[in-house]
Image (cartoon, rainbow, N blue to C red):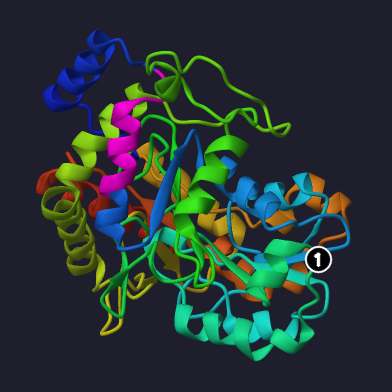
Amino acid sequence: MLPFSPPRIDKKIVDEVNAALLSGWITTGPRTKEFEKKLTAYNGNKNTLCLNSATAGLEIMLRWFGVKEGDEVILPAYTYSATANVIIHCGAKPVFVDVNKHDFNISTTEIEKHINERTKVIMPVDFAGYPCDYDTMNALALKHKNKFRANGEVQEKLGRILILSDAAHSLGAKYKDRRTGSLTDVSVFSFHAVKNLSTAEGGAIALNLPAPFDNEEIYKILCIKTLHGQNKDALAKTQKGNWRYDVVEAGYKCNMTDLCAAIGLVELERYENDTLQQRKHIFDTYSKLLSQNIFIDLPPYKTAEKESSYHLYPIRIKGVTEAKRDEIIQYIFDQEVSVNVHFIPVPCMSFYKGQGYDITDYPVAYNNYSREISLPVYYNLTDDNLKTVCEAVNKAIQLAMR
């Protein structure tokens, strides 16, 4: 079976993890701090904090901003459940909105319809690695400043809705020649096993807040908040006579380890000129080989203003039901090729249906989902593999449409 998205584990990764093990630093230490600095330099934002997941990063930022019961957070209906779950954890209300017809990203028109005095945060999602319309979104936050009702010092300092980007898919993506991480207030990346850049498990908060915020100071606050509220980490306490520490709040435990950062450092070093180039080649090859199939809508991934991180290659089958799409998927699997679906919209999930959400309120999101199939994308795919995938897809559609 041709797999869907195995991680890239080679000698460079193994050697660096081995070096981390032998160094004596296996929790948060010098490699994590180095990884943070290199991510900041790569993305062009102001400060970066590495954590054990993107989910932790999103929740910590909501809590830092003071999001609580009675507040609302706008997000796309078409995303993974983690984007919504963190809002629930904070006691706030997820306000789902529909997505664009031409891509899978949140509709800025729909966002504006749902902004009110309870709106504290907008959480766009760069689906498949394709950047959202950040200029428009940032402008919306300013346009509706008069509706914003601050609660607490941080919200008063910003004076408007926070744009918190779920950039789990989009490390290295570009919007108007700027990389994600530098496009809005805060962006959160994922380094999960299936992501372009993996640390096995992990994530990062890219801080890019405007003046008068001091992003370095916020970084230090978040370091405390994500390590039990402790005012010194293990690395700081190794300095001579520096053993004493304090706990200044009831914090959380979501720091990244040096073992994970060791993988990340290798991956980041070869990311721009190797990983992304190979993934772009895969996208271009799929588009070439599938462009003649009249039943397939190919995904957008590069325009004059936007360039994807080439994370997912989501095709949509024209004129099919969800059941027919599932039939096509089965025919593909029968040919020993793995594919996937990204994602079942959150309002379809039992918990959220129980909260009163209904997928019929988001017709574009459902239409996209019901026709979507994600094709394999990973570094070691060969051109022969890509031909095999496309032949399986074409044959499966032919069998289903007969």
* Amino acid type shown at disc 1: Asn
Residue 232 in sight: yes
Assess whether residue 36 is covered by the magenta stretch. Answer: yes
In the current view of this chain or complex, which residue is farthest to the front? 241
Assess whether residue 30 is covered by the magenta stretch. Answer: yes
Q: Is residue 29 left or right of residue 280?
A: right
What is the quadrant of residue 144 in the picture? bottom right
In the image, residue 335 above or below residue 230: below
In the image, residue 317 above or below residue 383: below
Which residue: 22% across, 27% down?
A: 9
Residue 400 in sight: no
Q: Nearer the viewer, residue 10 or 396?
A: 10
> What residue does disc 1 label?
151
Residue stretch in magenta: 27-38
Relative image position of residue 13 (x, y in whole percent): 19, 26
Quadrant that contains the N terminus: top left
Which residue: 46% across, 18% down?
A: 242
Q: Is residue 172 left or right of residue 354?
A: left
What is the quadrant of residue 284 in the picture? bottom left
